[in-house]
Image: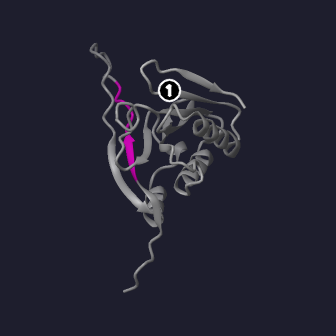
Amino acid sequence: MLMEEQYPLEREWRIWVVPPVRKKPRGHRGPRPEADPPRDVGTFQTVEFMWRYMNNLPEPSRLAIGANLYIFEAAIEPSWEDPANTNGGRWTFSIDRANSSDESWQTLFLMLFGETLDSDKQVVGIALARRRMYTRLSIWTRDRDNNLATLALGNVLKTKLGLPNIEYQDHGAEFKTYRHTL
């Protein structure tokens, strides 16, 4: 039996999926159903397992409207309340329905797993939110006060993905939004 050589990633990653919120039954007068919590799909820490997951996840354009997909460091949950995220924020941008988000998503996750997105491990995860008229991509960061690393990351994203503009949202109590204009 041949043993495959494994190529380790620098960090262990976890994939989370949130299905779309169920619609209220016709004529139902109660509150809107709450979103399901994120479902843990699995973890990986090698290139081989990363590709096994990526090849079996639907492309963004094929995800159900309202679904969310997260890829985070294995020990960090995709929520602002997770202790690893409370001092962070996220770069976010939307791709309208007319343009495919599949290529941007693939470029983003390859940059993440290739560790070319940021040199000082500022990124804790990436997120995709599929909506009817657009797809929103987010890059979650560890430390909002590290302005140099945060702006460098924004520049890399804007350049590599060819974005006209992106926003940085602070996960702090005030939830400030900063427009990145380069």
**At 38% from the left edge and 43% from the top edge, which residue is drawn?**
17
Query: Mark 1 highlights which residue?
Result: 170
Question: Where's the C terminus, which quadrant?
Answer: top right
User: Residue 20: horizontal and vertical position, in percent?
Assistant: 39, 34
Three-letter amino acid code at the position of disc 1 = Asp
Q: Is residue 88 visible?
A: yes
Coloration of the structure image: one colour
User: Residue 31: horizontal and vertical position, in percent?
Assistant: 29, 16
Q: Is residue 135 visible?
A: no
How many numbered marks, from 0 up?
A: 1
**At 55% from the left edge and 55% from the top edge, which residue is drawn?**
115
Range of the magenta residues? 13-23
Asked if residue 59 is positioned above or below residue 135 in the image, the reply reads below
Q: Is residue 42 left or right of residue 156?
A: left
Question: Where's the N terminus, which quadrant?
Answer: bottom left
User: Residue 64: horizontal and vertical position, in percent?
Assistant: 45, 39
Residue at the top extreme, as displayed: 29
Q: Is residue 86 left or right of residue 143?
A: left
**At 35% from the left edge and 31% from the top edge, which residue is drawn?**
81
Residue at the bottom extreme, as displayed: 1
